[in-house]
Image (cartoon, grey):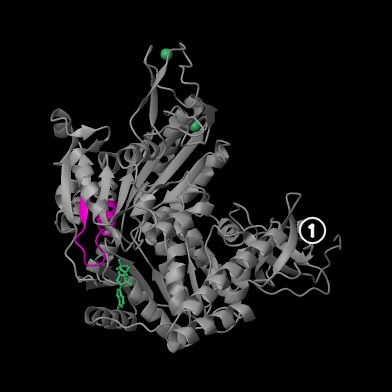
Amino acid sequence: MDTPVSGNTAFIQVILPLRLEWEPYYALPEGFAAHPGDRVHVTFAHKGYIGVVSAVDVEPQAARERILPIGGIAEGLPTVRKEEIQLWRAVAAYYLCTVGEVYKAAYPARRVDEEAVEARVRERLLVRMAKLEEKLAKARKDETRNRYRAALDALRSGKGPDPGPGQEIHLTLPQETAVREIRQAFAAGKTALLHGVTGSGKTEIYLSLAKETLAAGRNVLYLVPEIALSRQLEDRISTVFPGLQVFHSAETVARRQQVAARVRQDGPCLILGTRSALFLPHHDLGLIIVDEEHDTSYKQDSPAPRYNGRDTAIMLGVIQGAPVLLGSATPSLESLYNAENGRFVKVDLKQRFHESADPGILLVDTIAEQRKRGMVGNLSRKLLAEIERTLEAGGQVLVLRGRRAYAPTVQCTGCGTIQKCPRCNVPLSLHRNPDRLVCHYCGHSEAYTGLCSQCGSPLQPLGAGTQKIEEELQALFPQARLSRLDSDTPETQEADIIRSFAEGNIDILVGTQIVTKGFDFKGLTLVAVIQADSLVGLQDFRADERALQLLEQFRGRAGRRGRPGLLVIQTRAPEHPVYVRLSGQPDGRLLQERRLFGYPPYTRIVQLVLRDESPDRIESMGHGLVHDLSAALPDGPTIIGPYPPAVDRVSGRHIRHIRIMLPRDKSLLGRKQTLATTVSIFEKNRHYTGHITIDVDPV
Ligand code: ADP
Ligand code: ZN
Ligand code: ZN
């Protein structure tokens, strides 16, 4: 539209889905009305975008004749709520990114084959209905039949969420007490941290509070760290809330829009989702649940905003006036710290629902076993005996190995060369069926010839990943039904494998960290970790905490139904403090250590990451940036770096980290801003834009 801008034209400001530190002005042509939150077509630097009006009737701080008119109102696109923009601004300010980057994450561009999506949605609905019909046919009790019938009707009518009639929840006495304490915390305007051992029934507590909230006519947002988790929960929740609306970040854009449309409607609904569900057009939110709050998958790595879902949930809670409930069996030190200083109220739930003791722990020293001929390949005879006993008793086994693939490394038997990724310089992993060498950082993959790329001698696989462990177990237990779950598993099969294990159709499941998450498996009594040291060996101050959480979580998978469970840990270092602590030391020590060394939560870390093809330039830029930062941030923060991380080259680009530890006091906000400005000026002066990312609270 090339309407000339006349004297009495109105001007607006627009948020663009870009990394742009300001919100450009546009002119409203005669006859157009715009309101904050409207979506508009605009041109910026010769490209077209759909932006969001952030302010109207503004006095432009720019030469009027250079201001472009908008191209028009984006028809059919819903208006963005004031609270949504408020959240974007809060996230941008905290995570030192631009509002536009948050907008882009919240409203990903629509480029999907809509028909295919529609078909998929329909198909899922049909499957769900078929399942319900099956259940209905089997159900005996009238009450149950009515419930299924109502659920079916809700699905058929397409009305979706409907707070009832669902299965009743009967809380145990300790659960009731916990709910009361949580309500008290909410009444006092505080976030509640539910610290409940695995199997204590945290989910029941979430569902009971959710039910209350929905009955009061308000919406509930239920966050989980990962999609795989949400799928099992979906089944469980749908018995309590027929017609539940489920949303998560992996869903297509069209599906997301469908959910967003539902959220926009009136009438209470429950959204189960991963962190991106925080950016739905929420309103009338009465409760936000963050399950497994300690989980590092809540943190978004890339692209910006590099936000933590848990912390953003608290921002959303403030904006929406909704209470927030965090839950975990192993709360993060950050949350424990917040409970200690009174920002959160901690509620403890120490009793398991199916009364059973904590699973026992058997530490197997693989070096000692090796000497005694106690190892068969990568498995100890001690573990094999436990597996055998478990299978004989009709139980199930879950085996954790922190590395996927067949072998994490392959070495030449002639010249000793380790086969490495040409772009990342990290060892390539061997995958079988089909045989390939794969880089786990950039995805580079090449056919496996079995011969050295340098001298042509035969190659030897070193170490064992999940594929190899699966193979060894299958050879030792030929009758057992085995399966594997790691990121090589196609996403479409993930849910099937989990369901199949839950239904007892798999005897032994081998997998990576994904199997430690909050799944509830009835028949599972034995869990085992192979080469546990790969979990604790990381060079990071959080590594021990994370390993402890992971192992505690994993241990909680076993023996949830009254039968005694067992966790077997195969390790080369049985005296490592993590294993010692696993046997029951309080968390206090970890916090003390953090305080002593000035780590978070006692400080805040901002991490700058530089990426560059040129090794010389990254060196000089890194040092130059540290110099500028030291000058801009006098007498305060510790600046560490630039230093190369453990993997210092990915996809042909070198990497350097700079860590700034900021004291957690009144100066924090100002210092973070100064830091961001310094980086931005540095980028401009040195023409280095696009090489530096800022990560606040890295995990
Ligand atoms: P958590 O999430 O704390 O690890 P869950 O919520 O998964 O524990 O509960 C563990 C098991 O106990 C589940 O099978 C759950 O169905 C059962 N359970 C817990 N509380 C109740 C309750 N009040 N009524 C019926 N079953 C319960
Ligand atoms: Zn060689
Ligand atoms: Zn690579």
Q: Residue at x 63, y 65 (%)?
A: 123
The image quarter containing residue 126 is bottom right
Query: Would you say 634 lies left or right of 44 here?
Result: left
Start-end of magenta stretch: 549-567
Residue 575 visible: yes
Q: Quadrant of ligand 1?
A: bottom left
Depth check: give the residue in front, 342 or 419. 419
Report the side of 334 relative to 8 (left or right). Answer: left
Where residue 661 sits: x, y (%)? 33, 48
Residue placed at 54% from the left, 57% from the top?
250
Residue sitting nearer the eye, 350 or 360: 360
Q: Position of residue 205 (x, y in %)?
A: 33, 76
Q: Is residue 177 magenta?
A: no
What residue is rendered at 57% in x and 62% in y?
106
Q: Quadrant of the N terminus?
A: bottom right
- Density class for disc 1 (Cα within 10 Å; few <14, some 14-19, many ≥20) is few
Mark 1 close to ligand 3, CB under 8 Å:
no
Amino acid, disc 1? Glu
Name the one closer to the observer, 107 or 472: 472
Instruction: Tell me if 16 is positioned left or right of 227 in this view.
Output: right
User: In this view of the protein, which residue sits in the foreground, 655 or 447?
Assistant: 447
Query: In the rendered picture of this protein, how many numbered marks are placed on residues?
Result: 1
Q: Is residue 298 visible?
A: no
Whole-percent x and y of residue 143? 44, 88
Can you give x and y, in whole percent of width and height, for residue 356 in the image?
A: 18, 67
Q: Secondary structure at mark 1?
A: helix
Q: Which residue is mark 1?
A: 65
| Residue 93, placed above or below residue 215 | above
Left or right: where does residue 159 sit relative to residue 624?
right
Question: From what the image shows, is residue 621 above or below residue 167?
Answer: above
Compared with 600, 693 (above or below) is above
Quarter of image, res 573: top left
